[in-house]
Image: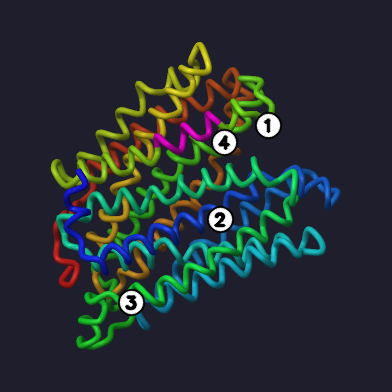
Amino acid sequence: MFSSLRELSSTQRHTVLASFLGWTLDAFDFFLLTFVLLAVARDFHASPAVVSLGLTLTLAGRPLGAFIFGRLADRYGRRPILMLDIVLFSLFELASAFAPNLAMLLATRFLFGIAMGGEWGIGASLAMESIPARSRGLISGLLQSGYPAGFFLAALANWLLIDHIGWRGLFVVGALPALLVIYIRRKVPESEVWQAGQHAPRQSLLRAMRGHWKLAFYLMLLMAAFNMFSHGSQDLYHNFEETSLHLPAGSGAAFMLVAMLNLGALVGGLLFGALSERIGRRRAMMLAALLAIPAVPLWMYGSSLVWLAAGAFLIQMMIQGAWGVVPSHLNELAPAAVRGTLPGVVYQAGNLLAALTPAAQGWMAARCGGLTTAMSIWIVVVALLLTFLVWVGPEAKDVSLAES
C-alpha cells in the first residue's frame, strides 16, 4: 500500500507533509473550542448554547475563506497563499485567547473560520499537483486523515493541559501552527502545474467555470452529504458518552473511545484512499459508506467498553475511509484554472449546509427514543444517501491535472 509513497521524491514528500500538517493543525485549532465550551460559558456568564455560536460562526466563515484564499491561490500561487493562510488562522486563534468578552470571542471565531476555510483547498491542490497520478489515492487518504489527527491532538491537549493553563492557555498553544510556515518556506516549492498554467491567457472566474456550474452544484450536495456523515458521528458523540454511557467528561474511558474513533479514521483514510487506486474513486467511496451501516450496532449498542471501542474504530474507519478519497476526487474533477478555488468552496459550502446536523439529531432524539437511536438512524440514512450521490456522479481518476 505504501509503495507509491516510497516512490515520491524528497521534495514531494515535504510538500505532502506540509499539506497534511496544515490541515491537522487547522483542525486542532477548530476542535479546541468544542472541548472548552462549558469553561468559556462559566467565565463569560453565558449559556453553552450561546457560546456554541462560535462554532456556527466558524462554519459560516469557512466557505467565504475558501473562495477568497482559493482565488488568491489561483492568481498568485499555492505556496505563498498557503503560508499566509496558516499565519492568519494561527493569529486569530491567539486572539481568541485574549478576548475580553464573549462578543469579541465570537468575532475572532468568525475570522478564524474565514482563514480555516482557505487551508484545505489550497493544501490539497498543492499536494495533488505535486505528485504522480498513481500516488493520488494514498496521499488523498493521508491528507484527509489530518482532520481526525487534529481532533485527537485537541482531545489530548485538553486532557493534559486544561487543568494547568485553562481554556485561554489552550488557545495560546493553538497559535503554534504558525511555525509551520518556516518549514514550508524552506522545504516546499510552488506547484509546477500552477507555474505551467501561468503561460496561458488568464481567465476570469465566470469564464473558467463556463460549462462547470452543474458540476459545482453537484459537488456541493455531495460534500453536504459527506459532512452530514462525519458530523453526525462526531459532534454529539461526547453527549452520547455522558448521557447514554454515563462516562464523566475528561475520564480515561471517554478519552479512550475518542482515541479509537480517531485511530479508525486514520486507518480508514489511508486504506480506502489507496484502494481507490485499484477499484476507482466512486467504488471505494460507496464501499466505505455501505460498510459503515453494519458497524452501527457495535458503535452505539456495544455491550462493554471493549465492544464500544471496537465499534468506534470501525465506524470511523468506514466514514473517514470514504472521506479519504475526497481530496483526489475533487481535484481530479476541478478545472485547472479554478483548482485552488472550486474544491475548497464546494467542501466548505457543503459543510455549511450540514451545520444543522447536531440540531437535527437533537430534535430526532427527543422524538425517536433518545440520542442513541437518533444517531444510529442518521448514519444509516446518510450512508445510503451518500452512496446514491456518489453512484450518479462522475469520476476522473488519473486525469492529467495540467489539462483537466
Please give the residue where the numbered disc 3 appears in the rendered image.
206
Q: Is residue 79 above or below residue 347?
A: below
Q: Is residue 110 above or below residue 323?
A: below
Give SS at disc 4: helix
Give SS at disc 3: helix
Please state which amino acid type lies under the numbered disc 2: Leu
Please state which amino acid type lies under the numbered disc 4: Ala
Please give the residue where the numbered disc 4 appears in the rendered image.
360
Q: Is residue 45 above or below residue 182?
A: above
Q: How far across and down, in percent of the image, does residue 376 sit?
A: 47, 24
Q: Closer to the N terminus: mark 3 or mark 2?
A: 2
Residue at the spot x=38%, y=28% of the render?
A: 314
Task: From the viewer's perspective, tell me whether residue 322 is left or right of residue 90.
Answer: left
Q: Spatial distance from mark 2 to mark 1, Cα to Cα?
A: 25 Å
Most common SS among magenta residues: helix
Query: In this view, which residue lies farthest toward the right?
Result: 45
The range drawn in magenta is 256-264
Residue at the spot x=25%, y=85% of the render?
A: 198
Residue at the spot x=35%, y=70% of the render?
A: 340
Magenta stretch containing residue 263, yes or no?
Answer: yes
Q: Spatial distance from mark 3 to mark 1, Cα to Cα?
A: 49 Å
Q: Is residue 86 above or below residue 196?
A: above
Please state which amino acid type lies under the numbered disc 1: Ala
Which mark, residue 249? Answer: 1
Give SS at disc 2: helix
Count of marks placed on residues: 4
In this view, the mark in front (3 or 2)? 2
